Image (cartoon, coloured by chain):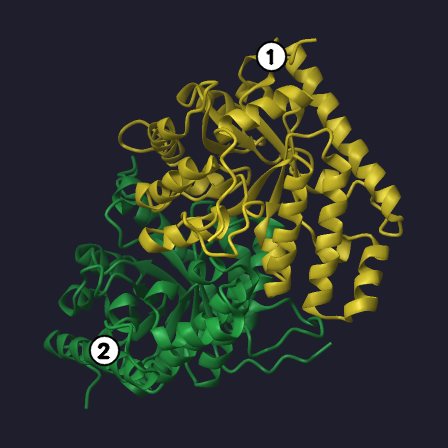
Chain colours: A yellow, B green
Amino acid sequence: MTARAPAAAPFADRLANRIEALRSPVCVGIDPVLSRLPECIRAEAAARWGETERGAGAALERFGRLVVDAVADQVAAVKLQSAFFEAYGAPGVEAFWAVVRHARSRGLLVIGDAKRGDIGSTAEAYGDAFFGPPDPGPAWADPDRWVDALTVNPYLGSDSLLPLVRRAAARDAGLFVLVKTSNPSAVEIQDQPLLSGETVAQQVAKLVGHLGRRLVGQRGLSGLGAVVGATYPEDLTALREWLPRSFFLVPGYGAQGGTAADVVGAFLPGGQGVLVSASRSVIYAYEDPGVTEAEARDRIAAAAQQMNTELRAALARAGKGFGT
Amino acid sequence: MTARAPAAAPFADRLANRIEALRSPVCVGIDPVLSRLPECIRAEAAARWGETERGAGAALERFGRLVVDAVADQVAAVKLQSAFFEAYGAPGVEAFWAVVRHARSRGLLVIGDAKRGDIGSTAEAYGDAFFGPPDPGPAWADPDRWVDALTVNPYLGSDSLLPLVRRAAARDAGLFVLVKTSNPSAVEIQDQPLLSGETVAQQVAKLVGHLGRRLVGQRGLSGLGAVVGATYPEDLTALREWLPRSFFLVPGYGAQGGTAADVVGAFLPGGQGVLVSASRSVIYAYEDPGVTEAEARDRIAAAAQQMNTELRAALARAGKGFGT
């Protein structure tokens, strides 16, 4: 049995502190599609491993590390989209965890964007998978491997959330529950009006508010967060009323059309309480796949910097800036 | 590029034919928890690999193959719960696919119970992960590896379902959408009454019925199925009215409390249209972890047989039997 490293602080505090220290609410989404990676990375992996899943996994890992190195000094968090790694089987999953470890070693907070949701012993198994097995864990339970927070789907209700809330509390980790997603058809289920006068998304927000008490940190914010899309600015503002102290994870910035002005309504004073996430508009900022790794890194760093600048300006205009 | 094996027939037909041929609507859930496996399997894996994820993966694979061999001649399908494999990282995922391949080689239909749900390019990546990449695929795209059907979560609406419906159609695969799950807190979101007079679950059922036209086979059944828990018999009957030709995947039989009498309402005439799934009550039927592998296999086979017998009797009583 390995002893786990003592927990540093609740996720909500670690996140708030890092946002403040870097003056950045930016989260960079790592959604690697093999065909869009720099050709030099793909060529090197193919030369070593051939056209195999192992080769794909090696390319994903190298690219993920490159993105981490490009943004580690200027953004609060990275979000790894599990699907893009799962697409390459076990080697893809190995790459996922290698990038997670690297990001943590660079001081980034890491969100596993896996949108899991299941009950009972299955929810516990997802807890094992993303936050590590309960103490005392097996020999291989590497304390640097697990994610700091996980995205979860609420359709199964609190049976699916509570086991992960408990595990997150024990691990100083966080959760982001899908409340209102960024896609057009989010309205089909999430915006349905209930007899009670609320929408389905508001019903979920109530559940998040209720369970979120268990993950409140020293600074008063809760690490049981909500996913609310940048593409629905009115919902961002309205749901902030329902969830005054939950962290919001806001996808849909950039490629999906969300702007800095769209997301300010979700913020608390001092630029707090929100992670704004962009993936494609940052990680593929180099456009030409013929770039060198150094060029790709520079372009990605510049795109993240640009996003920081846009958000800081919009927050300052709204009187919610980081101060001087 | 490898040519894919030509598709055999739509998933709905393959499933209906196998149910009919075996006179069995049983689906055995493979949810392996390391601590509950036969000690001989754990000891052998530990002797070879030590207390490592690789060792855990080896034990999961061996147990999964044992379950497959025990039930292959008498049940329609197996359902692998992804979480229990993901809990052991990349080696666990490798075990997942090894068990899938083995089950397919034994003629079983294989359901990946992963409850995925995401949009756009992420939904496509989940399609790659579970149904294989689009043709022409990469060299490693093994036609025997992918699942025959996947469970999916509808909270994000049709944006999350359509990419997988299209992929499933191209691959003669199926999907089971969570409509009404078997757990107590399913009511918190799924049973909420809408202004329209429907519940959230009924709203999802409408979506399933609408999109399901794309996966209808020669026999008139649709491979866009619905997950409805055995623990809610009234919903099983009511949702069958809403979804007259969708396959139902019915979890919650056995350990969760559902009985044969509870599930007959979901069946179509001739014992068709339903897969009843049990996990713990079948795969851990040996109770004593000190069993030999042969004993474990016999107990698991007997438990599956018992479930078949119970279901056939209940169906016959309801006038929905397989005939003679």
Residue A320 bears which disc, if any? 1
Give the Cα separation between the discs numbered 2 and 1. Answer: 62 Å
Identify the residue shown where x is 51% and y is 78%: B101
Callout 2 crowding tier (Cα within 10 Å): few <14, some 14–19, many ≥20: many
Three-letter amino acid code at the position of disc 2: Ala
Give whichever of B113, B48 is nearer the camera: B48
Residue under pointer 2: B303
Side of B141 where B42 appears, left or right: left
Mark 2 near mark 1, Cβ–Cβ under 8 Å? no
Of A16 and B43, nearer the camera is: B43
Residue B24: x and y in percent read: 27, 80
Callout 1: chain: A
Q: Position of residue B290 (x, y in %)?
A: 28, 75
Taking depth in this image into account, of B242 and A3 the one nearest to the observer is A3
Q: Amino acid at mark 1?
A: Lys
Secondary structure of residue under mark 1 = loop
Percent position of residue A94, x then y: 62, 58
Against A211, is B74 above or below?
below
- Indicate the quadrant containing the C terminus of chain A: top left, top right, bottom left or bottom right: top right
What number is the disc on residue B166? none
State whether residue B135 is above or below residue A178.
below
Of residue A23 and residue B25, the one placed in the foreground of this image is A23
Residue A189 in the image: x percent, y percent? 41, 42
